[in-house]
Image (cartoon, rainbow, N blue to C red):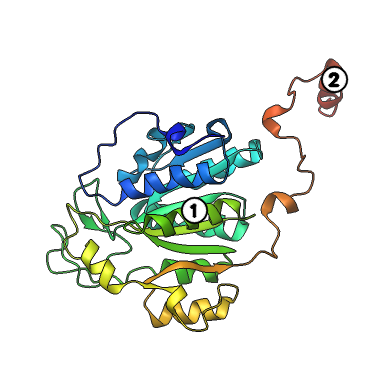
């Protein structure tokens, strides 16, 4: 069985020292090893941004897609080969700005993939602009008087869109983060895991210290029930989304591929796609 080290391709990440993404990468490697996945059965798809390098740092099938489009690629891979475990990775700028339309529809579609979003409340790779997750009043070089845009409440949005698995982690807590990724991968449906992953270079507000002071684990909330959408939404609103842990899971809803009519149990990637002469003539006869 593969261990964590088997998912290390010996390509050294070039993130800034202290970047939260290092912890996310290590947690993903640990998680896939813990659930018994082999490298040849894993596909990692990434978008653009600092987190877009993820697919190049894992020993597995990797696909570096374009900005905001990791989810369409990941869904296509899963439909072509349902035997693969498919993980999409991105940042808050990638998934909640240019890619937010794909995010919402992937959530409601409920295809069996896992989406890991590294949420640092800023654009890092382009040197520090406001993202859809930046707080009101957040100042950057391109918003020197402070952001006047309301940040997207992504977890509330996910629940409203019909999410069946929603979790939030923190890159300082590797044990919880690893466990959440394991649960997300094992969930039969779309899993959204939003991870507070501080940018140590361009975000001097939402720092490790800030998140450590602000975040509340749902396990510490009396009466919290991750099976209740209403309780999850109530607490997300009450705590401004600054929660960690498994926020909501619905195991009763079938995944997209389980509902898709005519979707063969045999993966498309293993199917003989050669067209016989008989079938060719039958198809072309329709146009005579």
Residue shown at 58% from the left, 34% from the top:
41
* Residue receiving disc 2: 281
Q: Is residue 135 visible?
A: no
Q: Position of residue 251 (x, y in %)?
A: 66, 64
State the image coordinates of residue 103 (x, y, percent, origin top left).
49, 56
Residue 83 horizontal side relative to residue 10, left or right:
right
Note whether 65 is above or below 198 in the view shown: above
Observer-side mark, 1 or 2, equals: 1
Q: Where 244 falls versus 17 (above or below)?
A: below
Q: Position of residue 39 (x, y in %)?
A: 52, 33
- What percent of the width, then of the height, locates residue 136? 24, 72
Q: Element under label 1?
A: helix
Residue at 55%, 56% (x, y): give it. 183
The residues bearing labels 1 and 2 have C-alpha atoms spaced at a distance of: 49 Å
Query: Which residue, given by chain and number where applicable, does mark 1 sit on?
Result: 181
123 lies left or right of 276:
left
Q: Residue furthest top?
A: 277
Work out whether residue 152 can be spotted.
yes
Q: Residues within 10 Å of mark 2 (few under 14, many from 20)?
A: few
């Amino acid at each position: 069985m593969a261990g964590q080290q088997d998912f290390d391709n010996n390509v050294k990440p070039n993130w800034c020292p202290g970047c939260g993404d290092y912890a996310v990468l290590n947690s993903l490697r640990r998680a896939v090893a813990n659930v018994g996945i082999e490298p040849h059965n894993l596909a990692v798809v990434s978008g653009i941004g600092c987190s877009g390098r993820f697919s190049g740092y894992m020993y597995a099938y990797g696909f570096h897609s374009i900005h905001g489009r990791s989810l369409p690629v990941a869904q296509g891979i899963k439909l072509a080969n349902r035997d693969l475990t498919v993980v999409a990775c991105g940042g808050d700028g990638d998934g909640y700005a240019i890619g937010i339309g794909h995010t919402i529809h992937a959530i409601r579609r409920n295809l069996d993939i896992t989406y890991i979003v590294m949420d640092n409340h800023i654009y890092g790779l382009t040197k520090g602009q406001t993202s859809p997750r930046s707080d009101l009043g957040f100042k950057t070089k391109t918003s020197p008087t402070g952001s006047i845009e309301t940040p997207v409440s992504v977890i509330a949005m996910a629940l409203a869109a019909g999410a069946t698995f929603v979790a939030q982690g923190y890159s300082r807590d590797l044990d919880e983060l690893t466990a959440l990724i394991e649960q997300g991968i094992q969930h039969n449906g779309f899993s959204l895991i939003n991870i507070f992953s501080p940018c140590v270079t361009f975000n001097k507000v939402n720092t490790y210290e800030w998140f450590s002071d602000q975040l509340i684990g749902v396990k510490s909330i009396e009466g919290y029930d991750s099976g209740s959408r209403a309780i999850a939404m109530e607490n997300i609103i009450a705590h401004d989304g600054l929660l960690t842990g498994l926020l909501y899971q619905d195991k009763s809803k079938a995944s997209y591929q389980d509902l898709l009519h005519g979707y063969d149990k045999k993966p498309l990637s293993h199917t003989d796609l050669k067209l016989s002469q008989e079938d060719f003539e039958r198809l072309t006869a329709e146009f005579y």
